[in-house]
Amino acid sequence: MRQDNDDENMEQIQRLIEEIKREKQMMRDEAHIIRGELSQAMYNEDLR
């Protein structure tokens, strides 16, 4: 019985870790986009 609980907990932990990894990658991607937009805005401002 206890082993079943441990196995379920491990599976849940693994799922949460995978979800966190996906969200972390999404945040990295968003940060990359924002940096690109900021660079473009600064470049356009320099051209004025």
Image (cartoon, rainbow, N blue to C red):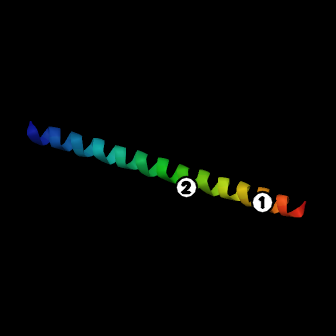
Q: Which residue is mark 2?
A: 28
Q: Amino acid at mark 2?
A: Arg
Where residue 1 appears, as percent x and y from the top left, is 9, 36
Which is more toward the observer, 14 or 32? Answer: 32
Q: Which residue is mark 1?
A: 42
- Name which residue lies at 9% across and 39% down: 2
Where residue 38 appears, as percent x and y from the top left, is 71, 56
Tell whether 41 sits left or right of 28: right
Mark 2 element type: helix
Q: Is 3 above or below relative to 48?
A: above
Q: Is 32 above or below relative to 22?
A: below
Which is more toward the observer, 18 or 23? Answer: 23
Real-space CA distance between mark 2 and mark 1, rounded to the nearest whole angstrom: 21 Å
Q: Earlier in the sequence, mark 2 or mark 1?
A: 2
- Name which residue lies at 48% across and 47% down: 23
Tell whether 21 sits left or right of 11: right
Where residue 18 appears, as percent x and y from the top left, is 40, 49
